[in-house]
Each structure stands twice: as C-alpha cells, then as structure tokens.
Amino acid sequence: MDNNLISTGNCGEYFVAAELERRGFTVAVPMSNVENFDILAINRSTHKQIAVQVKTTKDQKKEWVLNKKCEEFFGDNIFYVFVALRGLNNPEFHIVPSQTIAETVALAHKTWLSTPGRNGVAHKDNPVRKFEDTENKYLDNWQILY
C-alpha cells in the first residue's frame, strides 16, 4: 500500500478523533486495523457509544472512495466522517449516518451500472463505490452524533 495513502488516512482519523474529543466524546483509535470502523467513541454526558468509519481525501473534490461492504454494514450508532484535508490547517468534516451511506451509495452504483459508459458499452460491476457531498449537505453535521 502506498505510504502516502496511509498518511492521508491517518491524518483524517486523528483529526476526527481530536474533533470528537473537543465535542465531548472519549475516543479510542484502535492500534490495529479493524475491518468496519476506525474510531470508537462514547459521549461523556449521555454515554451513547458510536463507531466511526473515517474516509479522507486531500483532493479538492469532495468525493470519497468506498467499497461494496458499506451497502451492508450499517446501524443506528455507526457513522461515516468524510474528511477533506484542504491542507493541514483547516480540514472539513462531512458526518453521515451509515444507513444514509448504504442507501445513497447503492442507488448511485445501480444508476451507474444502468448508464452506458464509453462508446455505449455497459459498465461492469465492481466493488468500488463513491460518495460525494458537493453541496455540503453533511458539512459539520456533528449534531447527528448526539
């Protein structure tokens, strides 16, 4: 795996962990790779527990790559935080419930499969999925975590 991708991912995870701590959560970032989440957090006031999957981009486009498992792994206390690094001084956070990701990504992929590609050739199914928030619908949507 490209070390630059690892660094980008690590930056995003630690930015999210710091922001959650700042917002009243106690945070654990597992030392080893956990398959379905990057951060576990407990709200210090309500004791609500959440699992967070972090996806980070350093591109200017607000588009993140996921895989097919995001369509099947969701729950009331599972969230995605998409990070747009925009340099290291001012990251943007897009916070989305996992159920929303599952539905949105599945629909977008189904639409992509039904739309002809280059020269009218049908797209072939694959595990790659994408999520976009170009309209900033989920920008700084931290309140859904409470």
Image (spheres, grey):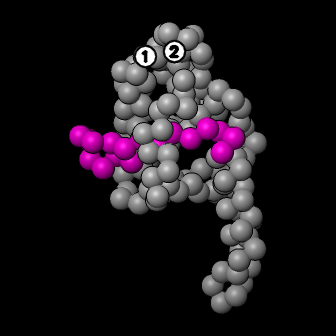
Comparing 4 with 145, the one in front is 145
Q: CA distance from mark 1 to mark 2?
A: 6 Å
* Residue labelled with disc 1: 24
Name the secondary structure under disc 2: strand
Q: Quadrant of the C terminus?
A: top right
Which portion, as a residue range, is magenta? 84-100
Which residue does the image show at 66% across and 53% down from the upper left? 104
Q: Is residue 82 above or below residue 115?
A: above
Q: Could you tell which of marks 1 and 2 lies nearer the N-terminus?
A: 1
* Residue labelled with disc 2: 43
Q: Position of residue 75 (x, y in %)?
A: 71, 31
Q: Amino acid at mark 2?
A: Asn
Is residue 86 among what the camera can see? Answer: yes
Give the side of residue 36 with respect to residue 17, left or right: right
Residue neighbourhood size for the residue with mark 1, other residues' Cα within 10 Å, grouped as few (<14), some (14–19), many (≥20)? some
Q: Are marks 1 and 2 in contact (CB under 8 Å)?
A: yes
Residue 96 part of the magenta-drawn span: yes
Q: Position of residue 96 (x, y in %)?
A: 56, 41
Q: Amino acid at mark 1?
A: Gly
Comparing 137 with 78, the one in front is 137
Is residue 14 among what the camera can see? Answer: no
